[in-house]
Amino acid sequence: MATPNELTAMRRAIAISAQGLGTTSPNPPVGCVILDRDGVPVGEGYHLRKGDHHAEVNALTAAGERAEGGTAVVTLEPCNHHGRTPPCRQALIDAKVSRVLMAVMDPTSRGEGGAVVLEQAGIEVERGVLEQEALLVLGPWLHSLHTGRPYITWAYSAGADEDDRDQVLAELRRTHDLVIRRDGTVEEGVPGSHGEDSFRVPLSLLGDEPGKALHALNESGARTVLIEGSSNEAAQLLADAVDRVIIDLPGTRPSFSLTGPGAESAVLDGFWLTDVKPSDSHVRLTAERATRDQ
């Protein structure tokens, strides 16, 4: 069982892992916290982009010798293969940690998997620690692996001048690998943020065949895509593949009213409302595609 300190550390690892959203793809956004023998945090790190050190290595570097005999708390099973960087399970073994807690198992892990190799080295391993919470960050990456296409978000304002919402959309852009603008152009969420030779922006527009468009987006290395604007043709082209809808409904305080066409049915059929956030100028609705158990 995870201790209260370890659960706190896992939530910290989940929080810092989000720093990699929009930059790590095609790799996953991962966070790691190192606790010393007494359960005190002594190092943390996250993965920023493919080709850079992974979260575990960054956390171990920060911890130094204090990692020996301690605990590594990581949001994803440590990798078990040599890629652009050495396997993280070996870094943990070499650092002589005594215990590793992981939230989500890695479906891309090679061979027996990093967790098994750690156990074979005499390290105590606990799986599934706060898994559902870690999926708040890792969920879109896992979705792309299971479906063979990116996780797609459609964001727009209902009954308002969408040009006025660009500043609001800027925060969404930085957490997505690719953005399809209202004129159909495709660009990197944060220009130049991904690793070299591991990510590319599609050079041409998406065309009129959903299957080919999704394939092109996936082949770019993108794991998350943001479609901007209510009248964006890409939203119609990829309608069956949209996983999340974010809608800003205009209104004012203190007497708030919803206005604009479609406001009364802004959450589309087949989607499940997951969040509602008011501000002085609008209410933001977030809805995800419904599953059978919802």
Image (cartoon, helix red, strand yellow):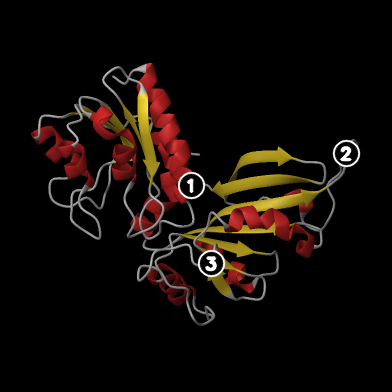
Q: Earlier in the sequence, mark 3 or mark 1?
A: 1
Q: Amino acid at mark 2?
A: Arg
Looking at the image, which is closer to me, 287 or 8?
8
Q: Earlier in the sequence, mark 1 or mark 2?
A: 1
Q: Amino acid at mark 1?
A: Gln
In the shown orientation, is residue 279 left or right of residue 18?
Answer: right
Looking at the image, which is closer to me, 108 or 208?
108
Q: Picture quarter containing residue 12?
A: top left
In the shown orientation, is residue 1 left or right of residue 86?
Answer: right
- For label 2, count other residues whose C-alpha is less than 10 Å away and answer few (under 14), some (14-19) or many (20+): few
Looking at the image, which is closer to me, 151 or 57?
57
Q: Position of residue 195 (x, y in %)?
A: 39, 64
Residue 186 is at least partly visible in this image: yes
Q: Badge 2 is on which residue?
A: 253
Q: Is residue 118 above or below residue 109?
A: above
Disc on res. 19: 1
